[in-house]
Amino acid sequence: MPRPSRQGEILDAALAVFAEHGYDAARVRQIAARAGVSDAALYRHYPSKEAVAADLFATHMRRTAEAFATIAGDTTLSVEERVKALARQNLTERNEQPNAHAFVLGHQHRFLSALPADFPYPIRILDALLQEGQRDGTVVDGPVRVLSALVLGCLNWPVITAQHARAGAIDLTDPGTAGLIADGAWAAVAAQRPR
């Protein structure tokens, strides 16, 4: 009978070690020790620290994409309501899993291009939602990828700023802060309304 996979435990351990030591300073032996496995057992699952990190990145990016797809696909809501709901979902993920959220945000330059071409990138989900808004006239005309980047900037830069600000300077759990971020994300792409 094959041994049960320890992959989930290894990924959880890697996330904790990366958060504690930083990605560059983290070592495979630290991840293995945190997971309660031998180095050899870890290497049976992953050939390197980079492979562990790439899987960790893909796992959490996919989780975000699935949550975004559920919200973006809810056509009972307007495009505006869905964009604002995506902003709130992003903050919920940040507040519930801060280390995972920080890892994905901080390591896109390393691992984003390694994802397979058919990966459900969150920006593609946003592209489709904003195209819907362009068709119904609620989203400004323009290159949809640029508009998606604007929305993602509104979602992620407050989080990045909060990570580097003094403790308590930005309260990402505050509903007022969440509302400002959601309103800003929508304002970045909303079509001008006649006065």
Image (cartoon, helix red, strand yellow):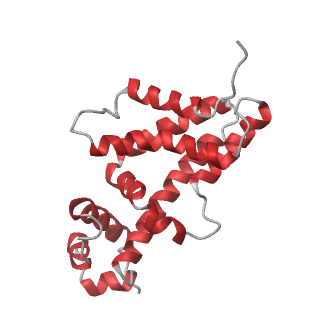
Give the answer, above or below, for where 142 lies relative to 169: below
38 and 184: which one is in front? Answer: 184
Q: Position of residue 181 (x, y in %)?
A: 46, 32
2 and 98: which one is in front? Answer: 98
| Residue 21 visible in the shown view | yes
Quarter occupied by residue 19: bottom left
146 and 5: which one is in front? Answer: 146
Q: Position of residue 6 (x, y in %)?
A: 35, 74
Quick one: quadrant of the C terminus? top right
Q: Position of residue 68 (x, y in %)?
A: 57, 46
Question: At 22% across and 79% down in the image, what residue appears?
Answer: 29
| Residue 5 visible in the shown view | no
Question: At 41% across and 54% down in the image, what residue appears?
Answer: 105
Quick one: quadrant of the N terminus? bottom left
Quarter occupied by residue 148: top right
Give left or right: position of 131 versus 107: right
Question: At 51% across and 30% down in the image, what residue appears?
Answer: 184
Question: At 76% across and 30% down in the image, what residue appears?
Answer: 137
